[in-house]
Image (spheres, rainbow, N blue to C red):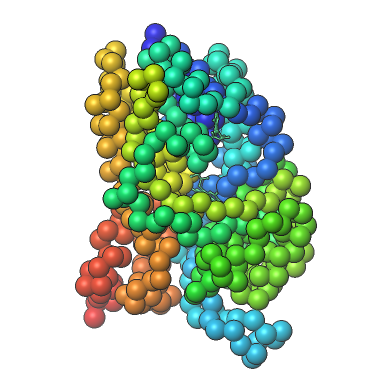
Amino acid sequence: MRKILVVGAGQSGLQLALGLQSHGYEVTLMSNRTADEIRTGRVMSTQCMFHTALQHERDLGLNFWESQAPRIRGLGVSVSGPETEDLPGGGRGRVIDWGGMLDGYAQSVDQRVKMAGWTETFVQRGGQLVVHGAAVSDLDYFSRAYDLVLVSAGKGELVSMFDRDAARSPYSEPQRALSVAYVHGLGPRPEHPDFDAVRCNLVPGAGELFVIPTLTTSGRADILFWEGIPGGPLDVFSGVTDPSEHLALTLELMKRFTPWEYARATEVELTDAGGTLAGRYTPTVRHPIGRLPGGGAVLGVADVVVANDPVTGQGSNAASKCAASYLASILEHGDKEFDEAWMQGTFDRYWETARPITKWTNAMLGVPPEHVLNLIGAAGALQPVADRFANGFDDPADFEDYFFDPDRTQAYLTSVTGA
Ligand SMILES: Cc1cc2nc3c(=O)[nH]c(=O)nc-3n(C[C@H](O)[C@H](O)[C@H](O)COP(=O)(O)OP(=O)(O)OC[C@H]3O[C@@H](n4cnc5c(N)ncnc54)[C@H](O)[C@@H]3O)c2cc1C
């Protein structure tokens, strides 16, 4: 039986560990936290996952929370206008506001729920769990004891083993300051009280507010997620350690920059003391093979090798797609040696999926060019455009066709209007 070590019990590591286990591999999972520590700890993400990524979980029979988690049927975009005195209480109005319908619903299951549950399932199914924060020196030893070592430790310190791929990493600094608050008591958007949607609120020059329905440890909740351009008016969460202060700041910014979202948030309270998160990181693509001091090689997975900013909500989706792609490559390889050529080929196969995700996400971090503003504006009057844009979150490769090039954007809009 082939022996595989998976380091890191997040979306990609657990999906791979459980997938390999179901195919008869002898899998050891190394996690720096127990299932209980994960469940009772701090939130880690907003983890909104779209149809394709959810289907990979269903294919492995891992969709344990599908019936409980809100079904997110739509994705809306609002753009705030300039600050004005004219609105009641001041604040800003919306210059763009539309909703696209998803072909297949999206879902967000708090990673504390999912990773704790999946870890327990892995152990119940006979998997070996080692609770230990792995260091490079540990991996040196383990690379000799296992046929393959997969490093799925997210954006933690182990990434230092993997060289940055400068040609694929346009940014050398974080592009957004992130702040998340999980709340109970958010009202529905009056435009669609009958179904759940992710709402993307763009505040030109300052950042974005995402509102995402989720399933958390205490049941249904919503996530208020600010992405602030560093140094701007939304980049104010550094050093805020008190959760209630974090929520108060979140709401204050909503009142000022997105009053239409604030209007439904006046009754909210935090889900729990671990329901807030703040931080920032630099979007980075890395070379996939980590070479160990003792000569061994390990393969990086998901965020270790391709970490995008969450502005497009792609990281968990990409982690699921990476795990599915790597699982297929491992199974197809049979009993042959997992050498460096195989590792590179395995990553290259995943990069076909990750490249358009990375390209679109990095584009969304910059100042949108005029043709993109026109496209987003046109979606307000053209439902097929809104729907297509929304479904691009499931399959960002579709943006290649009409998003990046002004002529192609125009040709697409013309094809929709028939003008
Ligand atoms: C604020 C925020 C919002 C986000 N929103 C979304 C969203 O809406 N949609 C979306 O798709 N993605 C989102 N993401 C991104 C998504 O959460 C990540 O891309 C995804 O979780 C990456 O999965 P992974 O398996 O690569 O790593 P992770 O999920 O980060 O898992 C890595 C695991 O390894 C463990 N670990 C780390 N170091 C070690 C070590 N040395 N030894 C052992 N274990 C270790 C960690 O504790 C963790 O459990 C968001 C991220 C952030 C920060």
Q: Is residue 13 above or below residue 102?
A: above
Please indicate whether residue 186 sits to the left or right of residue 257 in the image.
Answer: right
Q: Closest to the observer: 243 or 116?
A: 243
Single out the residue that lies furthest toward the front.
293
The residue located at (65%, 90%) in the rendering is 85
The residue located at (77%, 54%) in the rendering is 242
The residue located at (59%, 84%) in the rendering is 83
Q: Closest to the observer: 406 or 184?
A: 406
Q: Closest to the observer: 88 or 166?
A: 166
**Which quadrant holds residue 88?**
bottom right
**Residue 323 x, y percent position in the rendering:** 41, 33
Q: Quadrant of the N terminus?
A: top left
User: Can the viewer see residue 224?
Assistant: yes
**Residue 265 x, y percent position in the rendering:** 71, 66
**Which quadrant holds residue 66?**
top right
Please indicate whether residue 150 sits to the left or right of residue 191 in the image.
Answer: left
Q: Is residue 398 above or below residue 295?
A: below
The residue located at (48%, 56%) in the rendering is 174
Q: Closest to the observer: 44 or 384?
A: 44
User: Can the viewer see residue 71?
Assistant: no
**Residue 201 x, y percent position in the rendering:** 54, 68
**Which quadrant holds residue 343?**
top left
**Residue 347 x, y percent position in the rendering:** 31, 35
